[in-house]
Amino acid sequence: MTSGIVPLSWYRRVSIRSVFAKSLADRTTMTVLTGVGVGLMAFAVTAMFPSLEESLKELDLGSGFADFFGGASLATPAGWLSAEMWSIVAPFAIVALVLVDGARSVGSEEEERMIGMLAANPISRTRILAEKSGAVVVHMLVASALMGLLSWLAVIVIGLDLDANLIWGATLHLALLGFMAAATTVAVSALVGKRAKAMVVVGAIAAVAYISASMLPLFDQAAGWAELSPWYYYWGENPLIHGVNWGFIAIMGAIGTAVFGCAGLVFVRRDLPG
């Protein structure tokens, strides 16, 4: 008689034994599709610019419109890519990715009453959350890097006059925005234990942060309040024009780290189902 035990590959053995490896493998396809999808959109947007450049020079939408998209004219490669990709499409794609990924990584396991069984193993709750959070962050970094890489290739192929350092600066800002969003999603998921509820709450936070950072600078008396929004540190000083703002990078990193720390404190103290 042949044994009914199927030998596992080394990858499957590691995935079973490691929370991080299992979490990393769970949504790899979604991660790659997000990064490549937005990156291919960057190719399409970049390819449109040469044929529209002269028309855009004659288009006067006022200073308010330029401020809304990071202070750049649409008639420049930086302004065009800011308006068509980096100020809205890329950041919301990253936020959506970590929102789904983070909420499912913690919230769905609680809903299915599996998180308690996992926590009953000889592994600390802190490690469980750290490894699940680490996988979410890695997914976000991969998607951000794919967007940046394909955007850089698009600029080279189409031949736009835009320094590669500016594209990678925008990519770094995007990754730190994703880091903050990932931390917030994990923290809310650890607090409420419900995937849908966590997604709604974090989605609302992201929307308010975006509207505050985008609209308040249009009004002189309220412009300073925009700095209270975490989104401001992503695009308040357009990195496609000014390059990396290391002060803003540090602020976003500090916010994300602090929120992840709060998530750990909440997760350790909560009663888990299952």
Image (cartoon, rainbow, N blue to C red):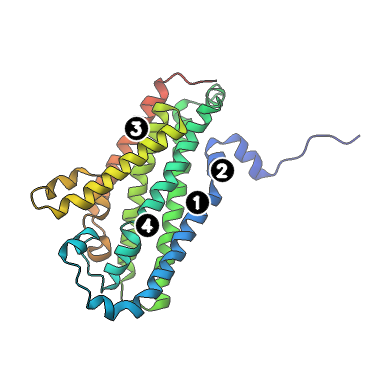
Element type where label 3 sits in the image? helix
Q: Which mark is residue 261?
A: 3
Q: Secondary structure at mark 2?
A: helix
Write down the residue under mark 2.
Answer: 26
Q: What amino acid type should be assigned to the residue bearing mark 2?
A: Asp
Looking at the image, is mark 2 or mark 4 nearer the viewer?
4
**In the rendered view, would you say 270 is above or below 73?**
above
Q: Nearer the viewer, mark 2 or mark 3?
A: 2
Quick one: label 1, few (<14), some, or many (20+) residues within 10 Å? many
Looking at the image, tell me whether mark 3 or mark 1 is earlier in sequence order: 1
Kind of residue at badge 3 = Gly
The single residue placed furthest to the top in the displayed view is 271
Q: Position of residue 78 (x, y in %)?
A: 28, 69
Residue 1 position within the rendered picture, expressed as x and y whole percent measured from the top left: 91, 34
Residue 162 is left or right of residue 138, and the answer is left
Q: Residue 89 — which label?
A: 4
Q: Nearer the viewer, residue 141 or 45?
A: 45
Q: Is residue 109 rendered to the left or right of residue 44?
A: right
Q: Are marks 4 and 3 in contact (CB under 8 Å)?
A: no
